[in-house]
Amino acid sequence: MRIVWRTTPGTAKLFLSGLLSLTLLVTAAAHSEEWLYTVRPGDNLWTVSTDYLIRTDYWPRLQALNGVADPARLPPGMKLRIPVPWLKRLPAKARVLSAQGQVNAAIAATGQTVPVNAGLLLQTGDTLLTGSDSTASLEFRDGSRVLLQADSELRMDVLSAYGPTRLADTRIRLQQGRVESQITSRTGAGPRYEISTPAATSAVRGTRYRIGMDPASATARTEVLEGAVAFRGGQTTRTVNRGFGTLAETGRAPLPPSLLLPPPKLAESPPVVMRLPVQLGFFPLKGAVAYRAQIVPADPFKALLLDTVLPALESENRGAVEVLTLLLSPVGSALPEGDYVARIRGIDDRGLEGRDAQYRFRFHALPGQDPEEDESRYIYK
């Protein structure tokens, strides 16, 4: 079938007006992130628009953007530039990478709450819940990951993908608890990553940061480790840059960002650990009212094996040089041989958590040795 195009005198003004609007749309599209589509035999701009775009009548925009002379004939192998915001939104899923302790998921489609194991796929509307001394990690369509800490509730508000790409629109809601996020870098309009809480909302385009929600004080907190975060509460948005944090109470604007506590200074520790618990020595940190200690694999966003908060010792003399030693046992006291990182950071009097000090070690258990048992996950020595 051959299609013939005709322009009548009565449509000339309409054509010129449409051409001006089209030019403005194409100019705006030039600032968006783009997907390159490889033309296959038999493709034309109508089939491509029908298969991939949010509206079939976007084909003239596609023609103008790519300088296509004949919309009915596209040479196989040609690369078509398609702005990501023009692509259809398709349902996406989040995959559970790990679950430690008591972790459950409330599945929206069935109304059931089920135990969570690695590999479970979550969809829009599902909610992930961690109990005390329990953690989970998730990976989203674009490769972004989160670590969900103990006593947390995280709902998948929107999980969608832009066409067949790995670009995603991820919007999740932290009702309570804490998460640490590592976000795949993105540019331009379209894909976004957003975590909302009852007190504030964070939006980013490629960064690493933490956000927490404390229902008891109706306060959300965020700490930025890389990049920058737009933190919005009470109709006010503040930009929080790397190394800074802030907090917002429900209905109020976020406080001006403040500098995070530096990493605690670590004592010398052996590169190979042969039995549990892991001993982590560090010097008291000025300004810390508490500490958070964690154990993670060498790939820190794959799992969170230990996550605990411990108070600063009341007898600490801020000018002292005595080393504090923590004895850390992961959940379940079982640690496969491999490479790990023990992390510790100070928590200030506003509840903002500082930058991590990291002790990297290899665990190589001696034959016939069982881990030392201790009801607590940490103890000062």
Image (tube, rainbow, N blue to C red):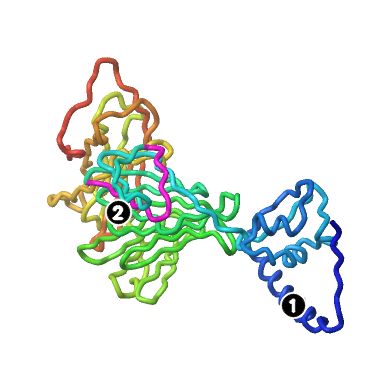
Q: Which residue is mark 2?
A: 153
Q: Residues within 10 Å of mark 1 (few under 14, many from 20)?
A: few
Three-letter code, disc 2: Glu
Q: Does the magenta run of residues contain 136?
A: no
Q: Which residue is rendered at x = 27% and y = 35% of the image?
A: 330
Q: Residues within 10 Å of mark 2 (few under 14, many from 20)?
A: many
> Residue most toward the left?
315
* Residue 175 drawn above or below residue 295: below
Nearest the eye: 69 or 203: 69
Left or right of 4? Residue 204 is left
Q: Which residue is rendered at x = 20% and y = 63% of the image?
A: 216
Q: Secondary structure at mark 1?
A: helix
Q: Which mark is residue 18?
A: 1
Q: Secondary structure at mark 2?
A: strand
Three-letter code, disc 1: Gly
Cα separation, mark 1 vs mark 2, equals 49 Å
Residue 254 x, y percent position in the rendering = 34, 71
Say which quarter of the image contains residue 293.
Answer: top left
Say which quarter of the image contains residue 178.
Answer: bottom left
Label whose residue precedes the other's in the sequence (1 or 2): 1
Q: Which residues are magenta?
A: 118-131
Q: Which mark is residue 264?
A: none
Mark count = 2
Residue 33 x, y percent position in the rendering = 63, 59
* Residue 198 drawn above or below residue 135: below
Q: Where does the C terminus fall, quadrant-wise?
A: top left
Nearest the eye: 130 or 266: 130
Left or right of 270? Residue 184 is right
Q: Which residue is rendered at x = 77% and y = 81% of the image?
A: 14
